[in-house]
Image: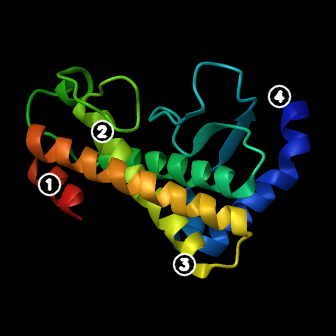
Amino acid sequence: GLSYQKPHVDLVERALAAVERYAPEVFRQFRRAIRLVALKPRDWGDYVMSSLSELPGAFIASVLNHPLELADRFIHEYHHNRLFFIEELGPFFDGPPGQAQSGPVYYSPWRDDPRPPHGLFHATYVFLAVARFWLHVYEEGAAAPADLVFAAQKLARVARQLRLGVGVLRRHVRFTPFGRSLFEE
């Protein structure tokens, strides 16, 4: 509720300022597309963040008391929302409708459980944007020393995850021409 949201306004403002500083194009798009961000305690619910295609322009994020980490989550969830909009232009995967969401599952470097192609594609898409954010934090070099170390660690982890996720998609997924063009981009 609002009583939980209000004490976190300053944190959200600092996170959005970090998005604006290190990912200005994402910030401009975020401002146009996102209408509602709800925060929740980290230990409430069995998820950290959530975006749903049925609720475009909205997401829930767990409170992380560090503006750069919260900015990471905002970028992540914004890109899920963005991909939901793009999906409305046409299917990404060959095969029967819904198979990419509920069909065979494959290794995911982002989760403990195997994921269907749709989940892997979403993860690859959003974590590419997250990697760009941390790269800009690191390259600018103006953040606190501990934040720069954290940025380097995030970059190393996400780069490995992206290589693995892209490899799984290349080996196991049949894209439509539209999906292939987005994947290759």
Q: Write the residue at 77% across / 53% down.
A: 12
Residue labelled with disc 2: 120
Q: Quadrant of the C terminus?
A: bottom left
Q: In the shown orientation, is residue 181 left or right of residue 67?
A: left
Residue labelled with disc 1: 180
Badge 1 or badge 3: first in the primary sequence? 3
Badge 2 or badge 3: first in the primary sequence? 2
**Residue 93 locus on image (x, y percent):** 15, 40
Q: Gap in Å between the C-alphas at discs 2 and 3?
A: 28 Å
Compared to residue 72, the image places residue 119 above or below, namely above
Q: Secondary structure at mark 2?
A: helix
Q: Secondary structure at mark 4?
A: loop
Q: Gap in Å between the C-alphas at discs 1 and 3?
A: 31 Å
Is residue 98 visible in the rendered structure shown here? yes
Marks 1, 3: nearer the viewer: 3
Badge 3 or badge 4: first in the primary sequence? 4
Mark 3 is on which residue type?
Glu
Disc ID at residue 1 = 4
